[in-house]
């Protein structure tokens, strides 16, 4: 009887520890969705986040620069600008 109680107790601890690691791993896997940003600057301003404007849909290309828009996450310090380190797609003008 003592062996079965010890076995059940040890299994409960093992499952508790395994469950703690499983829930932590699932929370850290959260990904953010990128949004469309129209590029409004000149070619020399391509790395300036203030030269991008949010677009709810895929922007229409016009103008003379080669970059039209990007898909990137919002900046954590300024949500009205893209985080240029998270660009997942780029649309170039023809």
Image: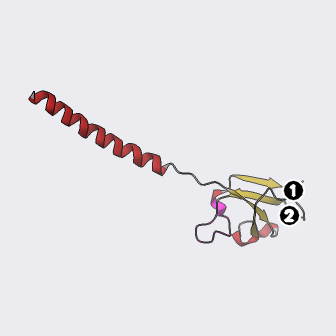
Across and down, in percent, residue 68 comes to 82, 60
Residue drawn at x 80%, y 54% is: 91
Q: Are marks 2 and 1 in contact (CB under 8 Å)?
A: yes
Residue drawn at x 68%, y 52% is: 88
Q: Which residue lies most toward the front here?
A: 1
Q: Residue 41, which numbered label?
A: none
Point out the image quarter for the N terminus: top left
Characterize the local packing of mark 1: few (<14), some (14-19) or many (20 or more) Cα atoms within 10 angstroms.
Answer: few
* Most frequent secondary structure within the magenta stretch: loop
Q: Residue 65, which numbered label?
A: 2
In the figure, residue 54 lies in which quadrant? Answer: bottom right
Q: Is residue 92 left or right of residue 28?
A: right
The figure's colour scheme reads secondary structure
Residue drawn at x 78%, y 69% is: 44
Question: Which residue is nearer to you in this view: 10 or 71?
Answer: 10
Residue drawn at x 81%, y 60% is: 67
Q: Is residue 74 left or right of residue 1?
A: right
In the figure, residue 7 lies in which quadrant? Answer: top left
Label 1, on which residue?
A: 93
Q: Classify mark 1: helix, strand or loop.
A: loop
Across and down, in percent, residue 65 comes to 86, 64
Q: Is residue 28 left or right of residue 39?
A: left
Is 84 contained in the magenta span? yes
Q: Is residue 14 above or below residue 49?
A: above
Q: Earlier in the sequence, mark 2 or mark 1?
A: 2
- Marks 2 and 1 sit apart, C-alpha to C-alpha, by 7 Å
Bounds of the magenta segment:
75-85
Characterize the local packing of mark 2: few (<14), some (14-19) or many (20 or more) Cα atoms within 10 angstroms.
Answer: some
Q: Classify mark 2: helix, strand or loop.
A: loop
């Amino acid at each position: 009887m003592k062996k079965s109680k010890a076995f059940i107790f040890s299994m409960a601890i093992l499952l508790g520890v395994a469950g703690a690691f499983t829930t932590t791993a699932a929370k850290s896997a959260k990904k953010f969705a990128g949004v469309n940003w129209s590029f409004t600057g000149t070619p020399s301003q391509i790395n300036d986040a203030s030269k991008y404007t949010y677009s709810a849909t895929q922007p229409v290309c016009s103008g003379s620069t080669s970059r039209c828009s990007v898909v990137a996450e919002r900046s954590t310090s300024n949500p009205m600008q893209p985080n240029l380190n998270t660009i997942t797609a780029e649309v170039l003008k023809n």
